[in-house]
Image: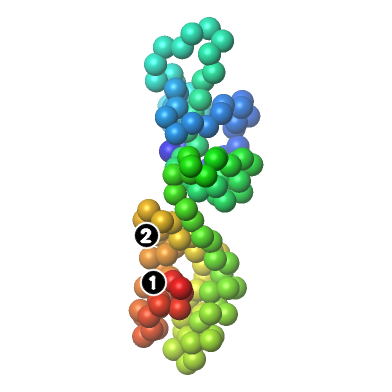
C-alpha cells in the first residue's frame, strides 16, 4: 500500500511501473529522503520488467484512480460506491426517522462497499442508520 504525507500523490516516473498483485518491487514514502523510494524485492536481470502493487482494489477503483482494469478472474475484490445524494434520497424515503439519517449522510462524500471488509464509510453509514433508530436493510439491498 502506497502512502505519503498527504494521503496520495501523483509521482512522475513511478507511475510508469506496471501493477502486479505479486510485484517485484515495493514503493513507499521515505520521510528521511522526503521522496518516494522504489526498492527491488529480489534481484532482477538486465531488461527485466520491474512491477509494483497499486493495492488490492476492485476494477472500478483501479479504473477511476489509475486508468486500467484487470481481467475479472484476477480482480481481488468487488466494490460498489454510492454518492451522498443517493443515500440522502434513500433516507427521505424512510419517513421521519430518515430525516436525521439524511442530515448525517450529507456529511459523507460517498460510501464504498467492499466485498472483503467493512470500510470506514460503510461503518459510518451503519452507525448513522442505527443512531436514527432505523436499520440498514434498505441501504444494503
Quarter-of-image position of residue 109:
bottom right
Q: Give 90 or 4, whichever is nearer the viewer.
A: 90
The vertical placement of 89 against 108, above or below, is below
Q: Residues within 10 Å of mark 1 (few under 14, many from 20)?
A: some
Quarter-of-image position of residue 84:
bottom right
The vertical placement of 118 against 70, above or below, is below
Callouts 2 and 1 close, C-beta under 8 Å: yes
Q: Position of residue 60 (x, y in %)?
A: 57, 51
Residue 10: tell me if it is visible.
yes
* Residue at the image position 53 percent from the left and 61 percent from the top: 81
CA distance for labels 2 and 1: 10 Å
The vertical placement of 23 against 104, above or below, is above
* Residue at the image position 48 percent from the left and 87 percent from the top: 94
Q: Quarter holding the N terminus?
A: top left
The vertical placement of 79 against 72, above or below, is below
Q: Earlier in the sequence, mark 2 or mark 1?
A: 2
SS at mark 1 in the image? helix
Q: Residues within 10 Å of mark 2 (few under 14, many from 20)?
A: few
Q: Position of residue 89 (x, y in %)?
A: 57, 80
**Relative to residue 108, is residue 120 drawn left or right?**
left
Q: Which residue is mark 2?
A: 118
Q: Which residue is mark 1?
A: 126
SS at mark 2 in the image? loop
* Residue at the image position 46 percent from the left and 73 percent from the top: 141
Q: Give 109 or 47, whichever is nearer the viewer.
A: 47
Residue 34: tell me if it is visible.
no
**Relative to residue 139, is residue 61 drawn left or right?**
right
Amino acid at each position: 500500500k502506497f502512502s505519503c504525507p498527504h494521503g496520495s500523490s501523483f509521482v512522475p516516473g513511478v507511475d510508469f511501473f506496471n501493477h502486479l498483485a505479486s510485484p517485484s518491487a515495493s514503493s513507499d514514502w521515505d520521510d528521511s529522503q522526503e521522496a518516494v523510494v522504489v526498492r527491488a524485492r529480489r534481484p532482477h536481470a538486465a531488461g527485466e520488467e520491474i512491477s509494483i502493487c497499486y493495492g488490492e482494489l476492485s476494477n472500478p477503483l483501479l479504473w477511476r484512480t489509475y486508468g486500467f482494469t484487470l481481467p475479472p478472474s484476477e480482480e481481488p475484490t468487488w466494490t460498489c460506491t454510492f454518492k451522498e445524494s443517493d443515500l440522502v434520497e434513500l433516507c427521505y424515503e424512510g419517513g421521519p426517522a430518515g430525516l436525521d439519517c439524511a442530515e448525517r449522510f450529507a456529511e459523507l462524500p460517498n460510501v464504498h462497499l467492499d466485498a472483503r471488509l467493512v470500510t470506514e464509510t460503510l461503518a459510518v453509514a451503519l452507525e448513522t442508520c442505527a443512531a436514527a433508530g432505523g436499520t440498514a436493510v434498505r441501504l444494503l439491498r
